[in-house]
Image (spheres, rainbow, N blue to C red):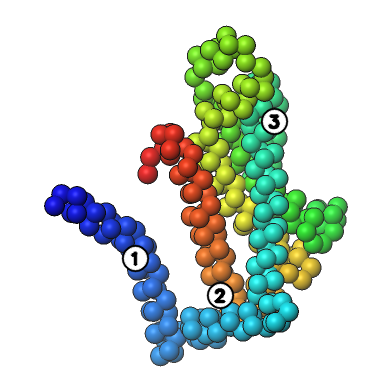
Amino acid sequence: MGVSWRKHKSSRATGSRWWLPALPVALFLAGWQLLAGVNLINPSLFPPPTEIASELAELYTSGLPTRSLLIGHVTATLSRLLVASVIGILSGTLAGALMGISSRLYRFFDPLITVLMPVPGIAMAPLFIVWLGFGDPTIIALGSIAAFFPLAYNTAAGVRSIDPQLVRAARMMEAGKGTLLFDVYLPWAAGYVLVGVKLGLARCWRTIIAVEFIAAASWGLGYMIWDAAEYLRAGVVYGGIFLLIIIYFVIEKGLVNTLEKFTVERWGMVQR
């Protein structure tokens, strides 16, 4: 009896995790549809969700069977995100680890990061367009820079917080610098690194979309939204924004949270 009750309670808790967050979204969309249907809001500026879905479906079918226009935009943005985030995360983690280990490197790079980190990628886009031209090089470079800073800061903070006794013990066992970095410092800082991954990935995503407004040649969700705005296609603009929300939600919940579950949560470093 006790086991069945716990299973029932667990299933109810699992179900509530899904429908509770979905409920306000569903109510919001239903209210939007109702207000647009009775013309209490301007459907030209706020098209109903059904019209937005129809616009997205039209974009999806456009170009088939060779290449869907909507899928082409999504694929272009995701490919840029993949390359930029990998470059930014790896370089930021390595730089942060070195800054955490060496106080001299930390004092040298900290002012530079402090000065450059607040500058948004869209503000640096004109410079990178001059240097690298329009298209992927500029978008990927700015996305990598956006992901770099949170990883460098968080990794450095995690490494600097290490228990000195662990370092002394590793050195007593004659651990080399590489062993210290990859087997002592980075595992200790794993929780900080994953927080940096979340922040860096979000910054990278926002920067890529923003820079696609002005630097993308013809593909990308940012380009799609900007092009639709120029032609006053409000349904495509809202649909693009909804896609940005949904895609990044899937990325964070499906990738980052899964990585966190099988690393720092399993190691007992964080709790949900």
Q: Which mark is residue 19?
A: 1
Look at the image and tell me whether residue 145 can be seen. no
Quote the CA–CA distance across marks 3 and 2. Answer: 41 Å
Residue 100: quadrant of the picture: top right
Disc 1 residue crowd, few under 14, some 14–19, many 20+, Cα 10 Å: few
Residue furthest toward the top?
A: 172
Residue 42 appearing in the image: yes
Nearest the camera: 212 or 113? 212
Left or right: where 169 falls relative to 108: left
What type is the residue that disc 3 sits on?
Phe
* Residue annotated with mark 3: 109
Identity of the residue drawn at 64% across and 46% down: 147
Q: CA distance from mark 3 to mark 1?
A: 46 Å
Q: CA distance from mark 1 to mark 2?
A: 24 Å
Residue at image location 53% in from the left, 52% down from the top:
255
Query: In this rendering, which labeled residue sits more in front, label 1 or label 2?
Result: 1
Q: Looking at the image, which is closer to me, 84 or 102?
A: 84
Quadrant (top left/top right/bottom left/bottom right) for the C terminus: top left
Q: Up-down: is 252 above or below 88? A: below
